[in-house]
Structure formats: C-alpha cells, structure tokens
Amino acid sequence: MGCVQSFRELCDRQKNTNVRKSLPAVCIVWQTAMIILFGVFIRYNEEADTHWVEHRHTKNISSDIENDFYYRYPSFQDVHVMIFVGFGFLMTFLKRYSFGAVGFNFLIAAFGLQWALLMQGWFHSLDYTDGKIKIGVENMINADFCVAGCLIAYGAVLGKVSAVQLLVMTLFGVTLFAVEEYIILNVIHARDAGGSMVIHTFGAYYGLSISWMLYRPNLDQSDRLHGSVYHSDVFAMIGTLFLWMFWPSFNSAITDHGDGQHRAAINTYLALAATVLTTVAISSLFQKHGKLDMVHIQNATLAGGVAVGTAAEFMLMPYGALIVGFCCGIISTLGYVYLSPFMEKYLKIQDTCGIHNLHAMPGVIGGIVGAITAASATESVYGVEGLINTFDFKEDFKDMVPSRQGGHQAAGLCVALCFAVGGGIAVGCILRLPIWGDPADDNCFDDETYWEVPDEEEDVPPILHYNNHMRNKDV
Amino acid sequence: MGCVQSFRELCDRQKNTNVRKSLPAVCIVWQTAMIILFGVFIRYNEEADTHWVEHRHTKNISSDIENDFYYRYPSFQDVHVMIFVGFGFLMTFLKRYSFGAVGFNFLIAAFGLQWALLMQGWFHSLDYTDGKIKIGVENMINADFCVAGCLIAYGAVLGKVSAVQLLVMTLFGVTLFAVEEYIILNVIHARDAGGSMVIHTFGAYYGLSISWMLYRPNLDQSDRLHGSVYHSDVFAMIGTLFLWMFWPSFNSAITDHGDGQHRAAINTYLALAATVLTTVAISSLFQKHGKLDMVHIQNATLAGGVAVGTAAEFMLMPYGALIVGFCCGIISTLGYVYLSPFMEKYLKIQDTCGIHNLHAMPGVIGGIVGAITAASATESVYGVEGLINTFDFKEDFKDMVPSRQGGHQAAGLCVALCFAVGGGIAVGCILRLPIWGDPADDNCFDDETYWEVPDEEEDVPPILHYNNHMRNKDV
Amino acid sequence: MGCVQSFRELCDRQKNTNVRKSLPAVCIVWQTAMIILFGVFIRYNEEADTHWVEHRHTKNISSDIENDFYYRYPSFQDVHVMIFVGFGFLMTFLKRYSFGAVGFNFLIAAFGLQWALLMQGWFHSLDYTDGKIKIGVENMINADFCVAGCLIAYGAVLGKVSAVQLLVMTLFGVTLFAVEEYIILNVIHARDAGGSMVIHTFGAYYGLSISWMLYRPNLDQSDRLHGSVYHSDVFAMIGTLFLWMFWPSFNSAITDHGDGQHRAAINTYLALAATVLTTVAISSLFQKHGKLDMVHIQNATLAGGVAVGTAAEFMLMPYGALIVGFCCGIISTLGYVYLSPFMEKYLKIQDTCGIHNLHAMPGVIGGIVGAITAASATESVYGVEGLINTFDFKEDFKDMVPSRQGGHQAAGLCVALCFAVGGGIAVGCILRLPIWGDPADDNCFDDETYWEVPDEEEDVPPILHYNNHMRNKDV
C-alpha cells in the first residue's frame, strides 16, 4: 500500500489533456495492426464462405435455413444494440458527459470487437490445418460479449479518463478476457452462457481495480458536474430499456440450438421482471417521502439479467429465475444506497456508474447460483440426453457428474475474480503514467475537455440575426 | 349517476402522496406471491425443456430450427420493444412527467407480464395431466400483449395517479383481460391476431372508464405542466417510431406459421404507411397556417396498425389495408381536434394521451373490419385448406362458415366493450378510495411528486465550483 | 449556367410558407391514387397468400420455416429501423429542426415505400399471367431501400424545403430509382446487394444536384439556427448508432440465402468497426487541442457501411473489409473538414448533413471496390458453384466471366451517377417553382415555419399557476 501510494504521487503531475497526437496515433497504428493481423489470420468459416453450398452437400444439410446465421443472427443484433445503444446511453446520465459516454463507448467497442475476434479466435476458432481463424456469426456474438466486459469496466472510470486510456484499458481487457474465458470454459469446463462470471464479474472487478488504482482524492472539485439533469436521465433510460429488453437475447445468444436458447430466454425474461419490482420497492423504502431514485431504476433493474447469466440455460425453473431476480433487485439497490458511498469513502474506489452494484455483486451471485443449479441437476429433471447436452458432458468430460460440475463452476468464478483484480491492478499501474492525457480533478465529467461542445443558446430569438457556430462552415 | 357523484365526493379527502409504505409493500408482497404461484404452477413447455431432444425424436421433427423459438422470437423481441420503449417513450411528451411515463410504464409492465403468464396460462396452457402451466415463447408474446392492454389504459390516466393505483389497475386489468380473451377467442371463436378488440378496444375503454370515475374537476390547476417542451416531443417520437416500425411484428407475432405471419406483416406495414399521409393531411388542414401538430404525428399515425389488427391475417388485400389506414388516419386526427376536448368538457373523461383517438375508435373499427372481412371470405380467394387454416375451422368449429364467423367476430367486439366498461367502472371505484397516494389536482403531471428530480442547472459555469446533488454520494 | 441563373431569379419571389392547402391536397390525392393503383395491381405472392399450404405441397417444401419470411423478416425489421429511426434521428442534430427532421422523414418514407412497391413491382415482380405485382417480404425490403435513396437526398436539403417539395422530390426520386435500379441490376447485370451504387451514389448525387439547383445565396441569414445544441447532438447519436448497428442487416437483407447473408453481415460489421477508429483519429488530428467533433462521429463513422455495400456479398475477405472501412473513415472525415466548406463556397452546393461525405464519396468508392473485387474473383477462391451463385452467372449470363463482370459493375456506377445528376437537375428545376411553400432564407432550419412548437418554459415554477399551451384542450 505504501509503495502504491508513492507510485501514485509520482504519477500525479500537471495534467495535459491535449490528445491530438496520442489519440490519432493509437487509432491509426492499432487499426493498421488489425488489418495486418486479420490479413494473416482471419477467414470466413464454412457457413459464411462461398463453399457453403458444397459443404451443405457434404454434410447432408437439407436447407439453407440450417445455416447458423438463422439460429443466431437475430440474437446477435439484439446483443449489438445492447453494446452500442444499451451501454452507451446508460452512461449518458451525467449532465455534461453524454458525448463522452456514447462516443467513447462507441470507440472502444469498435476497437475491442476486432481485437476480440483475434484473441478469442486463437483460443477457440483456430483451424489447425491451415493456421487460420475461421469466423462466423457466433464469433461476432462472442466478440461483442468480450467488448461488454470492457464497457462494464468503463462504467467505473466514466468521466475520469481519456480516450487513450480507455483504448489501453480495452486492449489489455480483451486480452485478459480471452485468456480467462479459455481457462474457465475450456480448461475448467465451467458453463457460462450469459457470462455472469466470464463477462460481468470479470468486467466489473477489472474496472473497480483500475478505478482503485486511479483514485482521485480531490474528485469533489468536479462535484458541480457529478450529477444528472432531467433530460440526461431520460436519455439514460433509453440505455436501460434496451439492455433490459434484449437481455434475454444476450443470455441465449450462444446457448444450444433449440431448447437451450428457448429456455435461456424465458429464464432471463422472468428474472428481469422480478428485479424491477424489488428495485422499486427498495428505492422507495430508502428515500424520504418514498420517492423513487432514477439511479436505481436505471441500474438495479438490470441486476437480475446479470445474476441469471450462468444458470439461464439450466433447468433453473421459472420460479427459480424469479427468486434470483427478486434477491438481486434488493441487493443491487441496497448497494447503491449504502455500499457505493462506503466504497468511495473507505475503500477509495470511485465507481461512477455503480458497476459494483449492477455487475460485480450480481455477477458473483450468478456464479454461485450457476454452481448450485449445476450441482443439483438430476437425470430425472433433465433426462439422460438433456443432461449431457446441457452440461456438454462429452469427449474429455463424458465422465463428469453434476455435483463435480458444481465445483468446476465455483472454480470458474474464482478464476474470473483473480484475473479481474490482478489484471485490473496491473493495468491501473500503467494507466497512472502521466502520458495518457487524463483530465485534472476539477475537469472530470466534462465533455469540454475532449469534445467540441456547441454553445448553449437553447432559446434563440426568432428574428435577431447574429453569428453562431456553423455546421460544415467554419470548421 | 347521483350515487356515483356522492361516492366521488366521499373519496376526495386531503391527498397524501407519500407512498413509502404502500408502494414497497405492494411490490414485495405481490412479487412474493408471484414466486409462490410460479413455483406451484409454471413449468417449461416441451420446446423449452431439456427433454426437447427426445420430443423431437418422438414427433419426428427434423431439425432444431423447427422449434417455435425460431418462428416467433424475433417477433417477440419487437413486441417487447413496443411495450417498454414504444409505450414508455410515447408518453414522455409531457414537460415534467417523463420519469413517470417511462418508469411507471416499466414497473407495471414488469408486474403485469408475470400475472399475465399465470392468468392466461390457466385458460390456455394448462396441462391437465399434471396441473401445470407449460410456457414457451408464445406465452411470453401473449403476456406482453396482455400488458399492452393495461399500458393503453395507463395512457388515459397518465400523470393523475400513483404507482400503487397503477399496480392495482394492472392487477385487475390483466385478470379481466384474460377472461375476456378466453371468451372471445375460445368460447366465441373469434379471430383477433393483432388484438384490435381483445387488446386495443378493451384496453382503451377500460382506461377511459377508470378516467371517468377518477374525473378531476379542478385539473386545470395543473395546466402549467399539461403540455410539452421541444425535447420532450422529440423523446415521444422515439416511442412513436418504435411502435410504428414494429407494429407489423405485433400483428403477426402469434399468427399461423408461414403465410399467416407473412401476410399479417405486409398488411400492417401498408396500413400504417397510409395512416401517416392522412394524419399529416388532416393535421395541417385543421391548424391555422397549415402547421403540423406533434400530438397528431405522435399518435394518430399509429391508428392504422390498431385498426388492421383483427384482419391482418385475413386476405384483406394490400389495397384493403391501405383503405383501413387511410380512414383511421383521418378519424384519429379528427378525434384529437374535436372529440378529445368535447369528451373532457361534456363527458367528464380526461384522457391525457388521447387513447380514445389512438386505440378506442381504431380498435372498434378494427373489430368491424375483421367481421366484414371474415364474413366475405370465400373458398375461391382463400382456397379450401387456406380457409380452414386462416379461420381455424377445425374440431368443434369444423362446420363453421365465413358468414357466421363474421357474426362471431362482431360478438367478440361486444364482449370486449362490455368487459372494458364494466371492469373499468368497478376498478375506478376501487381506485377512488383515499388510500392510494394519488396527487392533488394542482400536483398532477409533475414528477416531483413521486421522483427525486435533479436540480436544473443546465448551463453550469465551467470553472466555478459549488456543491450540487451528487450521484452515489449523499444518497 | 446563365439561363439557370436567370431561371433562378425568376423563381425567387416573396415566400409564402402556408401549406394548408397544398400539403393536405397532395397527401390525400396521392394516397387515394395509391389505393387505386394497389387495387388494380398489387396482390400477395405465393409465400404470403393463403394458398401457401398448397404451394408447399406442389413445390415439395418440407416446412413452414422455408418461407422466405423467416429468412428475411429480421433483416427487414432492422432495415425498417434504419429508415425511420436511423435516418430520422441522424438529422435531428440542428438545434431547432428536430420536428422537421424526424417528422418529414417519417412522411416521405411512408409515401415513398408505397410508390416504390409499385414502381419496383412493375420492373421486378410483375406476374405476366395475370398482370399483377406479387409482393412479399423481399419487396418490403426493396421498398425500404428505395426510400433510403430519397432520405439521403433529404439530408442535402434539410431545413431548406417544405414538406410538399419533399413529397415531389420523393415521387420523382422513387421513379428514377426504380428505372436506374432496373438498368443496373437487370440490364447491365451488375451486383449491388447493399446498394453502394444504386442507393447511396444515386441518392446522394440526386440530393446534391437538387441542392445545387436550390442554391440560396443568403442562407447565412439563418446562421443562428444552423448549428446544434448539446441534447440535439445526443439525439442525433441515436440515429447514428441504429444506422451503424443495423448496417450489417442492410447489406445482407437481400443477398443469397445461407452464406450470402452470412458473409455480407460479417464484412459490413468489420468495415464499420474500422471506420470508427479512423474517423476518431482524423477528427482529433484536425481540431485544435485534439478535441473530437460530433459532426464527424455522427456521420463519418457510417461511411464504411456505405462503401462495403456492393462488395459485401463477395469474397472481400475480413481484412479487405477492414481496409475499405479504414480508408472511408479518413476520406469521409476529411470531406467534412475541407470539402463541404469548399463545395458551399465555390460550387454553390449547400449540403446540410454533409451527404457528399457520408454517401456520395463512399458510395462511389463502394462501386469501385465492387468492380475490383468482382473482376478479381477466381474459381479457386469461390469454388465453381460459389462463383455462379455469388455473381448469378445463370440463364442469359451463364457465359459471363469475372473480369467482364468487373466492367459491368463499373458501368453500373456510371448509370447511377447519370441518373442522379440528370434527374436531380430536372427535379431541382421543378422545385424552384414558387408554388411549393418553401421558407425564406432567414427562416430556414426553423421548426416554427411548419410546426406548432411548444412554448419553452423548461423550468416551470412548481407552485405558480399560469395558463399554458394545453394538450387536447385549446386545439
């Protein structure tokens, strides 16, 4: 702790937020690297290649509709909306950081998904016959999933970092994610369709660790901007609702064809519905006069979707999903009321969006629920074939039993936590270097720092002619 | 009428809008009840259960893609967006009731869909062998449909009731809906794929009856808030457009696989397009200087989708759909211009969103169009098998003929109206009890009553540091 | 040029923006014409007709899921969102023209799609046995595509024309589009799945030519309104993101079943991701202090989707898609920085939304990329059957070879340019007639001209009661 502190002081020099060299350099160089790596490694898989028609004959596939595209593309588009509109708009709640919320979210997601296709491809989709990664719609979904982890982490540091820092954070985040995911899903053979552990627990603790490393003792100098205005809260509800509505697609996007996708969607739909009611209950209960707080409605209502991520494809049962949602709405809202202020004051973790309440705690709960549900699976409930399909008890794992699977699930959760905290602290160290253009403490949560912000003259006198910032003209 | 009036006066006591006890209590107790009832009654159906793989073999289903999930899930997600973003944002037009519009819409939809799964399940999906309700994606769509009825009713009382009242209204609304739906679809054997009668007519007259019971003679005391501002009108257009775009999915979501879904989507797409043009025409014609009114564009453009709900799956023909849309755009816009002020002044029905113009009249028209289209169906147009499939002339109804089907359709419309008005008046009585925390007449349309609203300091001086409402900190 | 100038002066009389007669007249008459033409010409195709069940047996189609509806409807809905929310909200960036942006976009799209169904139907879907146009989901997608061309053109004249002018522009635009499309796709046999040439090049140069004809030398009198405010820029990001996210569906909506749709989606997804990074890089590089400009983020990030339109279904390879996106992000952003001011000053083309940078240049690039990719196609990469399927080397074109196909692609691009510029100038002439109700130079970009705009009293004192514009009451 002492050495961390001194390292921190070392890094806190005069801030220079001009990123006119670093940001273009990073974008151009990294994008060029992506093109080269894609050229060397990435090809279409047999379902997206023009040889599909021959592949169909060889594999005796009766119809084009059997192409995985038709199983997964609608879910992919829903997930895509969650990543760009969902996460982007959820973070627009700050009165003067909507450009940064939506815009930087857009930037890091667009970079992250390319890097994720490579990283995840090397682990999961490498064709050893020719050394190429073969991609299709499932890779696109997984890339979006991977990006989700980094966007969750962005929520913790929203308004306090530069775009360059975010890109660095995403580069390492995606790398860590791919390794962690490989260990959890392939080595440990845990199941995690909706990513309670792999995405949410990892992403949230990764972000919180970074935020802890980047602790700003004088952040209260930006207090004037550290809140919402009426319409920014409405914008944030766009993000909330698109996340909430499409979460069933998120949790079912890469589950098994047929009953797997069907069941995962139902479970998520139910868990989220229950969360809304308990969130409202607790929000009202803990405010004077019983008024509701938009922060809770915007965030805690989503906790059920996080917590049901691992178990969504299991036979959790509809009432099981409701119970998970019920508990998470309460826990997450209480987190906003009590835990966030505590963490900021005593643990020195400044969590702008409260991702600890929305992703970290529900993610851990999701991991535990998944372990319990897996451990208590029986052939009488799942059927012989159903048990094998659901838990993928095949090949190397054909002797697996549900109780041991429960243990593996728990082990997966631990791996996610270790990678997140360890990785987050390491990346946080790097991000403290005084070269990234982050804002000073009294400049946080302010779009002026990184964006051309239009002059605010909302009520323009209708006749009077004066000069004004013109689009396309005096750029 | 006299006794109604005296009952009204009896109930009008001093208003107390503190719902800190009642709202959490209702949410927690009802959600707990849902968990118990789901535990007792609700299970996955054979397409969402892990036994699907065995079911496939038994039923000789060739591929996972035949799972109903792939027929209906994309439509389900579109409907889901309509319910939460469509209805939610459509009601954000008021200058200071956007939190209530989106937030309460979210709350009652999340509760309503759970209760709808149970109520509709008992009537439609009960497996008599084990006494369980078996749910799948079609149940989720139907639950969303059922919720739509209650959200339409919310439109009439927007800004004038508390969240507790809305929950009570939804509880009874869903119950009435499920009974009415069972009678119309199963007993009377009317067809109503897009719910012109079952959803829109019922929902609208249910809401209007409640609003009549809750008449506020001094509502003009809230006039200062009873209008829009520039950006609230733009937010409302988000709702309008998502409703408008996804209405083809709404009307085709539960129609027959294959041509049924295909035709319903085409008819709805066309009807809505025609409505836009006539709405613009009438809006311009009835304003001085030919200016357009956002209220009309936001609402009346949707009337064609409502009116084509029943007949969308029939052979209405593309031009038939256009004619329905043409008429409804005119009628609905004229309703906003003439009928709404008349209803408020003389019939004492205060209809905040004008649901009478958007849902009630077009819903009734839709029922009539459905009856006429059904009555005029012929084997030469539909084909022998087509006629049987479209109107479901099977089992108990295998001797049905189109002309009689037309009569049944008309009977269905009457049932919807009776349930709506009768149920609405009864529920309105309950909601007048002075225990629900509704706002006083000079406090309507104001988010301050039920929400923590951020201080409005849109133009924050960029350097000056003063204290402000902080997120996560002084909660 | 001289005669054009004198014609211009002839037309510039006193402006009268009252469209109370012309707008309703055009809407009602044209919609009535649509009903009559639909009655005469348009029927359901065999997949949307009740005879589908017999058609299935005849054609030996094994399952309802083979209905084209299930291949294309999810893509259709995504395209539909792009048309109405994507284009509509993208144009809301102006501080006081959001109603016009969303509302007129809505109007002309709703009219255009009906007229497009007819025009495209006569060329592509006419059943010569009975003289009827048979429509299904693919026609709906194509109608939306056709409308997209006109909405792109709207971007050039945004804020400077009346709704009547827009309808006239759409009527001729759709007509020209259908002819041009028929020549390019059927006569020349160029491939253009995502419409780089057919939609974007045509639409953009059509709009720019019209804007050139409607040049307003004194447009600076509206400078006070010719910029954005903070929240209007956030609204515009809704449009940007929905366009960006759903562009893979746009480019894959009408490609071949199976690998065609799959590959087009992947290519577009990748191209768009690369564009975001280079747009950010150039935007930051060309602003002092390295700040980002929302205009670039809102628009240039989409250029990759345009430019990959033609080649998306070819074996462009993932790295090829990235390269296209990389270049277009740079070119499009530089266009906003240098070209738009140049075009306004020296070429007298006032391009409100910068469609030259977003659609015209990337569209031409897309045509060229398509030609090169087609010309370099080989059997070793595509496979024998793959080559035939991808380029449709069948029937009349069964002797075609890739190198010649490349030439045909280039010819297609030229046709699109000729139709756009020629048609645009002609339509521009018509629109200069002083009968359409367009605004004066000091009244542009102002919703007050054509809309009832609510009084702006954002911060309403909570107790004080005064009268205000009321909804539904004093209409």
Image (cartoon, coloured by chain):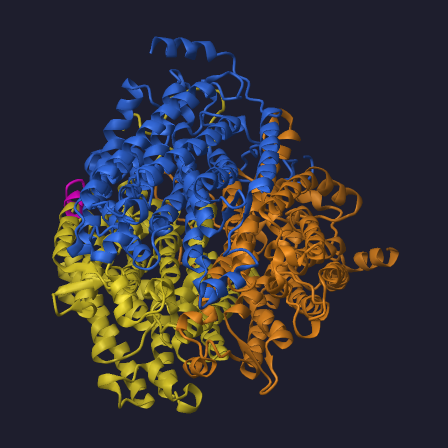
Chain colours: A orange, B blue, C yellow
Residue A106 visible at all: no
Report the side of C164 relative to B33 (left or right).
left
| Rendered location of residue C50, percent (x, y) | 24, 58
Report the side of A302 relative to C407 (left or right).
right
Assign the magenta stretch its main secondary structure. Answer: helix
Number of marks in the rendered image:
0
In terms of depth relative to the viewer, which is nearer, B9 or B410? B410
Q: Is residue B3 above or below residue A374?
A: above
Image quadrant in which the C terminus of chain C is located = top left
| Rendered location of residue A212, percent (x, y) | 75, 53
Q: Is residue C455 above or below residue C80?
A: above
Q: Residue furthest right?
A: A2
Image quadrant in which the N terminus of chain C is located = bottom left
| Rendered location of residue B169, percent (x, y) | 46, 28
At a point 38% along the width and 49% down the height, the residue shown is C94
In terms of depth relative to the viewer, which is nearer, C123 or C453? C123
| Rendered location of residue B420, percent (x, y) | 35, 28
Q: Is residue C21 magenta?
A: yes
Q: Which residues are magenta?
A: C19-27
Kindly indicate the quadrant of the structure image that contains residue A23.
bottom right
